[in-house]
Image (tube, rainbow, N blue to C red):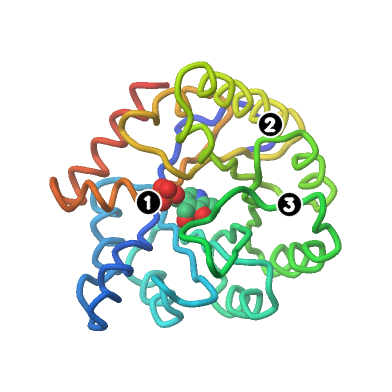
Amino acid sequence: MNASRLWPERLRLGVNIDHVATIRNARGGDHPDPVRAAEIVASVGGDGITAHLREDRRHIRDGDLSRIQTATGLPLNLEMAATDEMLEIALAHAPHAACIVPEKREERTTEGGLDAAGMHNRLAPIVTRLTDAGIRVSLFIEAEERQIEAAMKLGAPVVEFHTGEYANATGEERARELKRIADMAALAAKNGIEPHAGHGLTYDNVQPIAAIPQLAELNIGHYLIGEAVFVGLENAVRRMRELMDEAR
Ligand code: PXP
């Protein structure tokens, strides 16, 4: 999105294929191959592939990255912890985007956003080196004003709002979470930062998020891969796309 334009034309869908690799790794072989999932996502109009190379390599592995990058023309959004190891890997692979996420070894998934405000000194050189290499940096943060301010100070062009609390909430609490994300999307866009969102999004909860006009991209993984078991990945991605388009 052009930073001067506040409304992106189309909400992009990035599909996180980590959990295809989780299933593959359960048996230690090559099947199912996340690269095949990337090809399917490309064939049904997905806008990007997201993959998180975790420290423990529990799903995507180093060797998957270049195979994913060469399999389709889709941009790769590499989710990475703010570590020297991941920085070197990102620089070696030069993905379209790098989304910096918090990472705890013991967590089941990425629980909560990055404390961009508290980690300024750690993040600054990483953001600079990624940016200098032409990689679009995104920070996976909670939808909070101080985190957006921190992203501005760091010069990150993109923030991704963690929608986990929204996804887990019900009733009035969910409405409050939604408003928080909508308000912060507006604030980010007003300040020239492109807002994205993701985590825990499903067919049932995606539409209010997709209706937030400033959001440019949603990254969705676990639900789509789970749904693919029943209806196939093509159909799952198509259905999510339809719901997102209907919401705009
Ligand atoms: N965006 C980011 C930055 C993430 O870390 C994740 C989970 O890995 C997602 C989006 C996708 O979340 P989910 O798998 O719950 O759809």
Farthest residue toward the front?
A: 106
**In the rendered image, the vertical position of residue 193 relative to residue 21, given as above or below:** above
Residue matched to label 1: 221
Residue matched to label 2: 189
Label 3 sits on what residue type?
Asp
Quick check: 185 left or right of 79?
A: right
Q: Report how far apart the C-alphas of labels 1 and 2 lie in the structure.
A: 25 Å
Q: Report how far apart the C-alphas of labels 3 and 2 lie in the structure.
A: 20 Å
Residue matched to label 3: 115
Q: Is residue 14 visible?
A: no
Discs 1/2, front: 1
- The mark total stands at 3
Question: Is ligand 1 closer than 8 angstroms to the Cβ of mark 1?
Answer: yes
Label 2 sits on what residue type?
Ala
**In the rendered image, the vertical position of residue 232 relative to residue 68, given as above or below:** above
Q: Nearer the viewer, residue 188 or 146?
A: 146
Dot 3 or dot 1, earlier in sequence? 3
Q: Report how far apart the C-alphas of labels 3 and 1 lie in the structure.
A: 23 Å
Q: Is residue 52 visible?
A: yes
Label 1 sits on what residue type?
Gly
Q: Are marks 3 and 1 in contact (CB under 8 Å)?
A: no
The residue at the point 23 percent across, 57 percent down is 40
Q: Nearer the viewer, residue 77 or 176?
A: 176
The residue at the point 76 percent across, 42 percent down is 147
Asked which secondary structure carries label 3, the reply is: loop
Mark 3 neighbour class, 10 Å CA radius: few under 14, some 14 to 19, many 20 or more: some
Discs 3/2, front: 3
Discs 3/1, front: 3
The residue at the point 28 percent across, 30 percent down is 242
